[in-house]
């Protein structure tokens, strides 16, 4: 369904992706984890050519490109296979919630306006925002804006959804509402690749975890393989640091609530 072979990407002398190979089957949910700067988001952006890779092969559905030689038509066809949900929503500020969803349907898919409006309303209902149809993004919370972004991505019926740290820009109390929507989508046999720092969420929804560091895939496997059974020193170090940081955050929250004794 999605195949990436020997993918390379550098910015100047800085190597961001160093020969990445991944396979994603239809209906699989893949969570990509790893420290900041490991190449996770760049990998996602290369899949729909928001970043042009330097070398390698990408195949999504029936569309395949060679990174060193592809046409504008091939690039367009590859981009049509996926839809991205961004960190910072990327909604049109001058358009209503409904228009944000119908725009790609009418412009790209050439769907009649009435049909596009009907589909957009159904999707807004599915993410709990049917009452915000005529609102503008500025009137919505971050969690609501991200749910609009998810509805917009679903509208074009892509082969796969790509989530680039969908909760990183949200306040803690808004994260759960977005993750719940993604959980519901995961239950519908939707192919998804999710770059995330939410480890408990990744462990819950993902069929496979990919751990990246320094532009390489260090390890991949089921959530149990990575979070419980991993013997890889780099993976264990990352998870240990993550657990320590989460423990410190928890202690700080307790101190704020109850004070120090």
Image: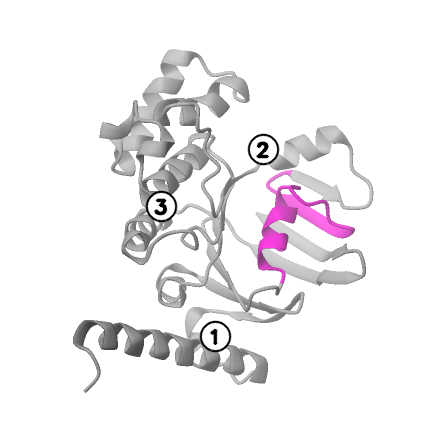
Camera sees residue 225? no
Mark 3 vs mark 1: which is more N-terminal?
Answer: 3
Q: Which disc, if any, is residue 226?
A: 1
Task: Write the residue at 62% across / 59% down.
Answer: 22
Residue identifier under label 2: 80
Mark 1 vs mark 2: which is more N-terminal?
Answer: 2
From the viewer's side, name the closer residue of 216 and 56.
216
For residue 233: magenta? no
Residue 188 against residue 135 in the figure, above or below: below
Is 3 placed left or right of 200 in the picture?
Answer: right
Quadrant in the rendering for residue 126: top left
Is 86 placed left or right of 170 in the picture?
Answer: right
Q: Report how many numbered discs are placed on residues in the image.
A: 3
Mark 3 vs mark 2: which is more N-terminal?
Answer: 2
On the image, the x and y values in percent for residue 105 come to 47, 22
On the image, the x and y values in percent for residue 38 come to 61, 65
Gap between marks 3 and 1, in whole Å? 23 Å
Is 100 placed left or right of 18 in the picture?
Answer: left
Task: Write the residue at 27% across / 72% down.
Answer: 253
Residue identifier under label 3: 185
């Amino acid at each position: 369904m999605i195949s990436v072979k020997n993918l390379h990407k550098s910015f100047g002398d800085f190597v961001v992706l160093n020969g990445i190979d991944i396979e994603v089957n239809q209906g699989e949910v893949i969570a990509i984890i790893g420290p900041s700067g490991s190449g996770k988001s760049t990998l996602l952006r290369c899949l729909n050519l928001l970043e042009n890779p330097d070398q390698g092969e990408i195949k999504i559905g029936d569309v395949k490109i060679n990174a060193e030689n592809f046409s504008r038509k091939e690039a367009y066809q590859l981009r049509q296979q996926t839809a991205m949900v961004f960190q910072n929503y990327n909604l049109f500020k001058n358009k209503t919630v409904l228009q944000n969803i119908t725009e790609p349907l009418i412009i790209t898919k050439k769907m009649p306006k009435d049909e596009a409006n009907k589909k957009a309303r159904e999707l807004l209902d599915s993410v709990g925002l049917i009452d915000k149809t005529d609102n503008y993004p500025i009137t919505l919370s971050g969690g609501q804006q991200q749910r609009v972004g998810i509805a917009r991505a679903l509208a074009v019926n892509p082969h796969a959804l790509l989530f680039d740290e969908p909760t990183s820009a949200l306040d803690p109390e808004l994260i759960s509402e977005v993750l719940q929507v993604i959980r519901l989508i995961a239950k519908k046999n939707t192919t998804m690749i999710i770059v995330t720092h939410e480890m408990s969420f990744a462990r819950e929804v993902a069929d496979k975890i990919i751990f990246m560091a320094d532009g390489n895939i260090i390890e991949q496997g089921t959530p149990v393989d990575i979070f419980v059974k991993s013997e890889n020193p780099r993976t264990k170090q990352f998870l240990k640091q993550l657990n320590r940081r989460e423990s410190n955050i928890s202690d700080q929250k307790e101190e704020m609530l109850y004070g120090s004794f």
